[in-house]
Image (tube, helix red, strand yellow):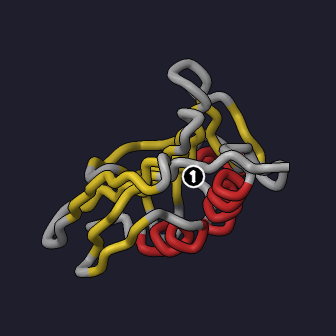
Amino acid sequence: MARRPLRVELLIHECGRRTTQLKRVSLGGAVLATLTFDGTIQNGATVQDVEAAIQALDGVDTTLLIVEILSGKSLTIGGGPERFVAEIAEDSHHRWTVVEPDNGDESIELVVGGQLVDYPARVCVTVKAALEAARTFMEQDGARSPRVVWSVET
């Protein structure tokens, strides 16, 4: 059975001294991204590229990444280095957030996309949960991992 190719775009939002440049290129009909990040260039995001980007989120200078695939689904992960918010948008109306329900609703401040935001503790997850969400998303055509808890958050 032939697998259809994924279009993967890796975008990293950075604030501060570093610069990010994103160029879209076409390879074999699929749109991929070339990312210049901290002096290096990545052509075509892989699972490993996304994992490294998650690990690079520091909550100060590098605070947001977005991965989009051909189906239109996107994965957004922000924050760092200890707590993250992770969301899959299946389309413009259906968004799922990774949650840790036992964390409750106490307010936690995270810098996401360069902005300080108060999030309920239940949506502030560990790097392990963010990595699991990203791996499954990348390996299974935008699927939500059954190994983390998902919720529709507004």
| Residue 99, placed above or below residue 57 | above
* Residue at 62 percent of width and 39 percent of height: 97
Taking the spot 23% from the left edge, 81% from the top edge, the residue there is 39
Determine the image quadrant of residue 134: bottom right
Outermost residue to the front: 28
Say whether residue 38 is left or right of residue 67. Answer: left
Q: In the rendering, at what x and y percent does residue 132 appear?
A: 70, 61
Name the residue that disc number 1 marks. Answer: 124
- From this viewpoint, which residue is outermost toward the left? 17
Residue in front for this viewpoint, 42 or 123: 42
Front residue (pair 110, 16): 16
- Residue 120 seen anywhere in this rendered image of the structure: no
Q: Secondary structure at mark 1?
A: loop
**Residue 24 x/y as whole percent:** 31, 52
Image quarter (top left, top right, bottom left or bottom right) of the C terminus: top right
Residue at 61% across, 23% down: 94
Q: Position of residue 89 (x, y in %)?
A: 56, 33
Give the quadrant of residue 96: top right
Figure quadrant of residue 23: bottom left
Image position, residue 133 (x, y; %): 67, 55
Q: Is residue 113 visible to the viewer in this orientation of the structure?
A: yes
Vertical order, 150 against 42 (above or below): above
